[in-house]
Image (tube, grey):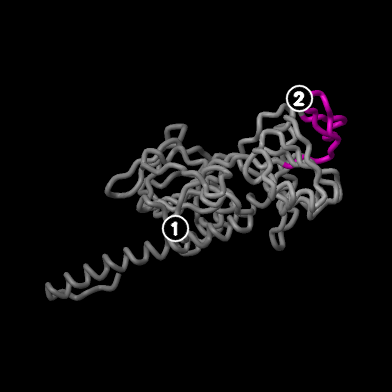
Amino acid sequence: MTEVRTDGYEVLVIGGGAAGLSGALMLARARRSVLVVDAGSPRNAPADGVHALLARDGMPPAELLARGRDEVRGYGGDLLTGEVEAVSRDDDGFDVTLADGRRVRAAHLLVTTGLVDELPEVPGLRERWGRDVVHCPYCHGWEVRDRAIGVLGSGPLSVHQALLFRQWSDDVVYLRHSAPQLTDEQAEQLAARGVPVVEGEVAAVEVAGDHLTGVRLRDGRTVAREVLTVAPRMVARAGFLTGLGLRPAPHASGAGEHVPADPTGRTEVPGVWVAGNVTDLSAQVGAAAAAGAWTAAMINADLVAEETRRAVEAYRRARAGGLPANPA
């Protein structure tokens, strides 16, 4: 177990996924004191492998994170298993309380807690999630290519999802389920791409021999499918920030909620930064890792600017008092 520094950290990274570990690596290499607190519940845990990540395609998510943790430790970064329960702020920085009662002090926060996928309430759907119930064609399309795919209509992006998966298979069916009635344009697009539309609410997922075989509609009809895709409602894991007045906001895509930030990852609360899926709902592992590194560099630049400001003030005071000015 990591012993938490009593004098606090320059940066506390909340969330130890790709974004958080990448950010911590950048900060540790910048010789900053950094602690990563992670609850150990990664979003992509059900997946067999990480895909579309250069030089790491197909690597199991757990192995990728284990390597990342080792790299952070190798540069002197600390890691701690725990869940952040609350955050408060004072003149000296942030006071962070963990669920087990431990407390951590930090000057800056980098929040990389990711998001939660809220799936439609269809019996059997959650149990197949990450296996033959998937959501992202760039993450899973190759693995389900040329199979019988059903797209479960559940939100504003469902038709777009059906058109995307059509790239990977000629056998795609749009199950309208609870999605809004198709517009004339959407109906024409699906027809033009050869995607049949099945009306009716899906009542359950059909499984045989640990393989998805289709869906059963509310009226008793069944539709044979080997794969289901669903566009979940994605919600940022950021409830612990409410004490700072920072709350998730609706995402412009209509796909869920995120923590807004500027292009550097800076939020409206000074000292609080975000990276990865907690702010960018569509980021894959590579994009999340890149965002974590970028935002960490911005945090370091912010710290350098503050240190320089203080050094200049001390330098001027020393000069005014006729004392030798030691560079800081």
The structure residue drawn at horizontal position 50% and vertical position 44%, both measured from the top left corner, is 250
Find disc 1 in the rendering and name its residue.
262
Kind of element beneath mark 2: loop
The earlier-in-sequence mark between 2 and 1 is 2
Q: Amino acid at mark 2?
A: Arg
Q: Amino acid at mark 1?
A: Asp
Give the farthest residue toward the front: 184
How many angstroms separate mark 2 from mark 1 (CA)? 45 Å
The structure residue drawn at horizontal position 40% and vertical position 39%, both measured from the top left corner, is 242
Residue 20 in view here: no
Kind of element beneath mark 1: loop
Q: Magenta stretch: give its range.
A: 205-229
The structure residue drawn at horizontal position 68% and vertical position 48%, both measured from the top left corner, is 61
Q: On the rendered structure, is 41 left or right of 296?
A: right
The structure residue drawn at horizontal position 13% and vertical position 74%, both measured from the top left corner, is 320
Of the 4 image quadrants, the one containing the C terminus is bottom left
Residue 203, percent across and down? 74, 26
Residue 205 in view here: yes
Using the image, determine if residue 286 lies above or below residue 40: below
Residue 290, image quadrant = bottom right
Residue 327, percent across and down? 28, 73
Find disc 2 in the rendering and name its residue.
218
Q: On the rendered structure, is 274 left or right of 205?
A: left
Residue 30, percent across and down? 46, 64
From the viewer's side, name the closer residue of 179 and 144: 179
